[in-house]
Image: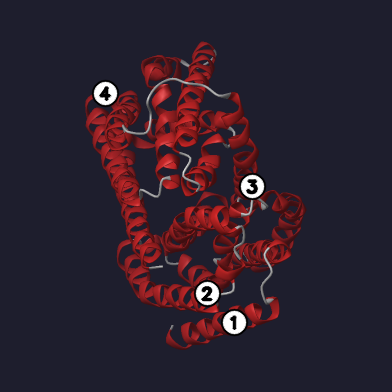
Amino acid sequence: MRRIIKDTFILAASNVFSIILAALGTLFIAKILGPGGYGGYSAYKLIISYIVNLQLGVFQGLQREIPCVKALGKRERLNSILNSVFSFTLFISLIGIFIIFIFSINSSSFFKKVFILTMPFVPLYFFKELFKFSLKGLENFIGLSILNIFDSLSIISFAIIFSILFDAEGAIFGFAFSHLIFFILSFFITKKIFYGLKFNLEDIKLLLKVGFPIFFIGVLNVFLFSIDRLFILGTFGREGFGVYAMALNFLNLISQVPIAFAVVLLPFLTRKKALEGSLESFIRRDFLIIVYLIFISVLIIALNPVICFIINNLLHKYKPALPLLKLLLEFIPFSTLSFFFYSFLIAENRHFYIIPYQIILLPLSVILNSILIPKFGLKGAAISFLILQTLFTLITIFISHRFIKFKLLKSFSIFLTFSFLHFLIFEKIF
């Protein structure tokens, strides 16, 4: 347990620091390039994020299968999986290069130039994700934290330097070049893992079977929790969208703690499942949930004054985000439990049961936002966000209970009691 707490703290701290660095760097880059140049830089990064998804969840599968194989002491099997994924990554990166080439043929002169200029770096975008997911599975969270911070520093530094020299084209080249530096450092950290280009189709099939549902659930969540922003953009324009986005950005910073906790917890649960065959003894530890909820509550209460100070003194134009953020922070602790129970479902390889419920939530999201936003404005979007987060959390809890028996009513009484206490304390203080 001490190791889980330590690794969670390290990973969460590095994630928050990386996000802050990226935000500061983005401000400098946007100022240097202007709206047009920054738009091109952002569009290129968006296109790359889509192309990397060609891996279809193979990388996500590593988070579950690596600790499982390690727990069973199958070293040769582990090497086979890692080498197969390394070879698979190289193959799909060639497909990525081909797609970029097609884009360059049918693009404006600006994008034609940057696509051709950065084409040699395309494989590095894929290997970056491979190394990150491999380190998660191997539970090397110190190495992952170092890479996260270094990644943000590298992207910012090279993008700013090259943007000063060569404008938007330089910023994009700097972004691409930073991935070469990232690859070199990643290979140095993980050089004992990858021995050669050896491909086993069965390994990839296994990882797809486990990882594709994780990948697909992530895609559905992107759609599910972006519908509110689409409604806001259409109703209130860019200004309203900016205010709401600022509230969600600060919420995302706080969410790095439960996210890091889930990332650290998953390999531990997978090993436990492989060795003991059941996770019931662990999930029944009410003390763990109590400590988790208390910590999240204390964190929110401690950070809220800092966030208010930043918005009031440094981001004056975003003051309308404060009541939205207050509403979100009052009710969000319960919703963060979805990260906790989702880790159990992945360890049990039952996470795909979430997908049908997510598909049902998509039209519900449209209905909620179409009713609440016209009636309550930006607060309506926040209410819709909280309702959907709560429903998603309830789904993960009920599905977990279906496959891992624990005292549901007792657990719910704990969840609701501490969530209500958080609401009362937060309301009383702020």
- Residue corresponding to mark 4: 166
Residue type, label 4:
Phe
Tell me what residue is drawn at x 65 percent, y 43 percent: 213
- Residue corresponding to mark 2: 289
Residue type, label 2:
Ile
Asked if labels 2 and 3 touch by Cβ distance under 8 angstroms, the answer is no
Task: Specify the color scheme.
Answer: secondary structure
Q: Identify the mark at residue 414; answer none if there is no mark.
A: 1
Query: Callout 2: 10 Å neighbours few (<14), some, many (20+)?
Result: some
Q: Earlier in the sequence, mark 4 or mark 2?
A: 4
Residue type, label 1:
Ile
Mark-to-mark CA distance, 4 and 2? 52 Å
Q: Disc 3 or disc 2, which is closer to the eye?
A: 2
Tell me what residue is drawn at x 49 percent, y 74 percent: 288
Mark-to-mark CA distance, 2 and 1? 8 Å
Q: Can you say which quadrant of the picture contains the N terminus?
A: bottom left
Residue 377, percent across and down?
62, 64
Judging from the image, what secondary structure is the residue with disc 2 in? Answer: helix
- Residue corresponding to mark 3: 217
Residue type, label 3:
Ile
Q: Earlier in the sequence, mark 3 or mark 4?
A: 4
Judging from the image, what secondary structure is the residue with disc 4 in? Answer: helix
Q: Identify the mark at residue 188; answer none if there is no mark.
A: none
Q: Earlier in the sequence, mark 3 or mark 2?
A: 3
Q: Can you say which quadrant of the picture contains the C terminus?
A: bottom left
Mark-to-mark CA distance, 1 and 3? 27 Å
Tell me what residue is drawn at x 69 percent, y 76 percent: 408
Tell me what residue is drawn at x 31 percent, y 51 percent: 142
Residue 249, percent across and down?
45, 57
Asked if labels 4 and 3 touch by Cβ distance under 8 angstroms, the answer is no
Mark-to-mark CA distance, 3 and 2? 24 Å
Judging from the image, what secondary structure is the residue with disc 1 in? Answer: helix
